[in-house]
Amino acid sequence: MKVNGKVIVVTGGGSGIGRELVLALLKEGARVAAVDISEKNLVETVEAAGSLPEKLSTHVVNIADKTVVDALPGQIIAAHGTVDGLINNAGIIQRFVRFKDLELAEIERVMNVNFYGTLYMTRAFLPHLLQRPQAHIANIASMGGFLPVPGQTIYGASKAAVKLFTEGLHSELRGTNVGVSIMFPGATSTNIAVNSGVMTSEQQSSSDMKYKTTPADVAAQAIIAGIEAGKYRVLIGSDTKTMDFLYRLMPERAAGIIYNQMKALLPV
């Protein structure tokens, strides 16, 4: 599905990959409904859009709140006339600690945003997408959704759930007008740790310097290219592509490589 002239909903549109998706889609000629829990971040996205805000609507929404999400399609259709695409990008990570050290409330928060938020959004918008001549759903998983990352076990479990949910949805929607893609970004230059409340800006900057990351705008372009090409699966970043190959070839050794890279972040 070409995005030009289409109406695309982007969750997490206030920062990181989500903001870059909003800006890139606008430049490609799409109309965009940016959804985010932070009104401040959405205002900054509008400012970054510059001369294109007439094609952009913003919606302050907690995607983990099913009642609020259920009302969202009507609001977006009122603003844009229709809806052709959904990019479930919003997500949070957990504290960099072992599973045994996480509180149940922290676990539920990650699952509610990452998995149930994606599920609620998809459930709310799918009936409208099925009415369009051509439509697309793109769900953002993570390299951590197919490869275990110590200190991010629950985050990884939430993204693994997104992975299989998306693959199942793809199978169920074969032969319909709705395409479905699953995206796997690796380490990306975003403020996800800060927005998730698990790091300060200074801590994240220090952490990012230790690892090669994919710029958020590059990740956004790869996601849009995947949607336009109708790809089933998109690997974003050299780290994701390398680890996907290694994990298929020798899963335990690949898991050990990631452990050795990440163990310094874990408390003793």
Image: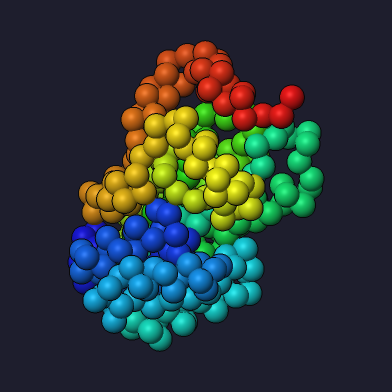
- In the image, 261 versus 67, the foreground residue is 261
**In the rendered view, does 226 fall on the left or right side of 137?**
left
Residue 4: where, in percent of width, then height? Answer: 20, 66
- In the image, 216 versus 8, the foreground residue is 216
Q: Quadrant of the N terminus?
A: bottom left
Residue 172: where, in percent of width, then height? Answer: 44, 52
As drawn, 57 above or below 38: below
**In the rendered view, does 193 fall on the left or right side of 5?**
right
Q: Quadrant of the C terminus?
A: top right
Residue 95, quarter of the rendered image: top right
As drawn, 77 above or below 157: below
Q: Residue at x 20, y 64 (%)?
A: 28
**In the rendered view, does 241 fall on the left or right side of 159?**
left
Residue 18: where, in percent of width, then height? Answer: 41, 58
Inspect this view and state whether residue 131 appears. no
Q: Residue at x 33, y 83 (%)?
A: 81
Inspect this view and state whether residue 182 appears. yes
- In the image, 84 versus 89, the foreground residue is 89
Residue 82, quarter of the rendered image: bottom left
Residue 158: where, in percent of width, then height? Answer: 60, 44
As drawn, 16 above or below 210: below
Q: Residue at x 71, y 29 (%)?
A: 267
**In the rendered view, does 245 fall on the left or right side of 133?**
right
As drawn, 51 above or below 62: below
